[in-house]
């Protein structure tokens, strides 16, 4: 009997509650000021060490995922030059190119899984804090969202994605996520921007007594990519209008560079009801009721031991 050890890692969706574009560097990277939270829906990655590097995809959104070196999971594995190889089984539940960090979350999950093997099975949040890993700059170079997905905590994100300030006091939120099944290329959205030097969020964020305070404050903030994305894909505006038409939806806004739009609700029951109604009316849309906040504990690797003959 041969015993094999696997590591399973949850890759939560990333939601930009705000996204202010505050400038552009000489190298072309845009400067951002964004409030992010993570959802209790996401992809699942199972990792096993081996002699070669490969990825197999399955799940409802797997068809659009590359399995060659265009896949960020394999690019992260290439950073672990001291390890002989690894095989990945990616269960893809999040739409591709949807503004909720799916590929970056998968990359961060691959890093967490491989780091667990490197450390002999040790699982600790400190191992996956971008501030503690010498690979942080390499991960950032692969994708600006990867370090924040590695953190998987509600946070204020500045710079090009490398400046992260966790916000443990941020109230948990109930939301509906909708993707209208169109893919939006992030470079195209940035190219369509009319202004690249908008004001940032306040230097000091308020302390929110509860979700209602956060709703009211978020309503005064922005996603500066929304107008450009809607110009490229008008259906994003249709999704936002559909959410805003729900009398229980407190705020509707696009996440990231789109095309996913989120709606915020007072309770989980209201969010589920809103999701059910919209799913029935728009059967071709991807619709999920979620909780938004910190997902670090759930994203910690879980070791699985499987016996094979």
Image: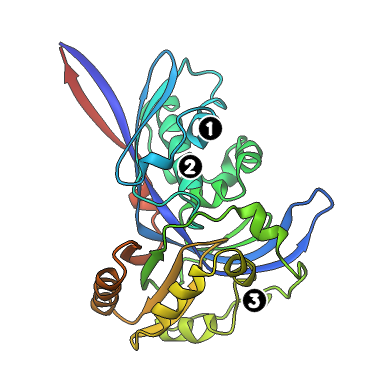
Q: Which of marks 1 and 2 is nearer the N terminus?
A: 1
Residue at (32, 32) in percent of width and height: 7
Q: Contact (CB < 8 A) between labels 3 and 2?
A: no
Q: Which of 288 and 227 is in front in this view?
A: 227
Residue at (21, 17) in percent of width and height: 3
What percent of the width, then of the height, locates residue 23? 77, 64
Q: In this view, does 244 lie to the left or right of 203?
A: left
What percent of the width, then of the height, locates residue 42? 36, 51
Element on which disc 2 rests: helix
Write down the residue under mark 3: 204
Q: Tell me how far mark 3 sits from mark 2, CA to CA.
A: 28 Å
Q: Is residue 179 left or right of residue 280?
A: right
What percent of the width, then of the height, locates residue 197? 78, 69
Q: Does residue 43 appear in this view?
A: yes
Write down the residue under mark 2: 108
* Residue 216 against residue 128 in the figure, above or below: below
Q: Earlier in the sequence, mark 3 or mark 2?
A: 2
Of marks 1 and 3, the one in the foreground: 1
Q: Nearer the viewer, residue 114 or 226?
A: 226
Q: Which of 23 and 96 is in front in this view?
A: 96
What percent of the width, then of the height, locates residue 178? 39, 66
Residue at (36, 72) in percent of width and height: 175
Q: Which of marks 1 and 3 is nearer the N terminus?
A: 1
Residue at (37, 47) in percent of width and height: 299
Write down the residue under mark 1: 76
Indicate the quadrant containing the N terminus: top left, top right, bottom left or bottom right.
top left
Element on which disc 3 rests: loop
Element on which disc 1 rests: helix
Indicate the quadrant containing the C terminus: top left, top right, bottom left or bottom right.
top left
Q: Tell me how far mark 1 sits from mark 2, CA to CA.
A: 8 Å
Q: Does residue 162 appear in this view?
A: no
């Amino acid at each position: 009997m041969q015993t094999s050890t696997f590591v399973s890692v949850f890759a939560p969706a990333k939601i930009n509650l705000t996204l202010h574009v505050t400038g552009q560097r000489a190298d072309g990277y845009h400067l951002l000021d964004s409030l992010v939270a993570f959802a209790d829906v996401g992809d699942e990655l199972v990792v096993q060490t081996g002699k070669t590097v490969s990825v197999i995809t399955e799940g409802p959104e797997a068809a659009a995922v590359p399995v060659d070196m265009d896949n960020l999971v394999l690019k992260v594995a290439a950073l672990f030059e001291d390890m002989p190889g690894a095989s990945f089984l990616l269960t893809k539940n999040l739409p591709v190119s949807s503004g909720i960090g799916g590929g970056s979350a998968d990359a961060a999950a691959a890093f967490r899984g491989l780091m667990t093997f490197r450390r002999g099975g040790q699982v600790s949040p400190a191992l996956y804090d971008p501030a503690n890993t010498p690979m942080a700059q390499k991960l950032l170079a692969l994708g600006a969202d990867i370090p924040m997905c590695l953190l998987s905590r509600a946070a204020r994100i500045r710079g090009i994605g490398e400046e992260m300030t966790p916000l443990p006091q941020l109230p948990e939120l109930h939301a509906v996520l909708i993707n209208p099944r169109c893919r939006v290329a992030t470079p195209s959205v940035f190219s369509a921007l009319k202004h690249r030097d908008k004001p940032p969020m306040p230097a000091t964020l308020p302390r929110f007594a509860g979700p209602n305070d956060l709703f009211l404050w978020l309503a005064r903030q922005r996603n500066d990519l929304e107008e450009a994305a809607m110009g490229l894909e008008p259906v994003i505006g249709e999704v936002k209008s559909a959410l805003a038409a729900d009398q229980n939806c407190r705020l509707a806004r696009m996440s990231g560079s789109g095309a996913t739009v989120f709606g915020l609700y007072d309770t989980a029951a209201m969010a589920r009801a809103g999701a059910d109604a919209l799913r029935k009316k728009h059967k071709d849309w991807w619709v999920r009721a979620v909780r938004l906040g910190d997902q670090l504990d759930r994203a910690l690797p879980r070791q699985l031991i499987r016996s094979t003959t």
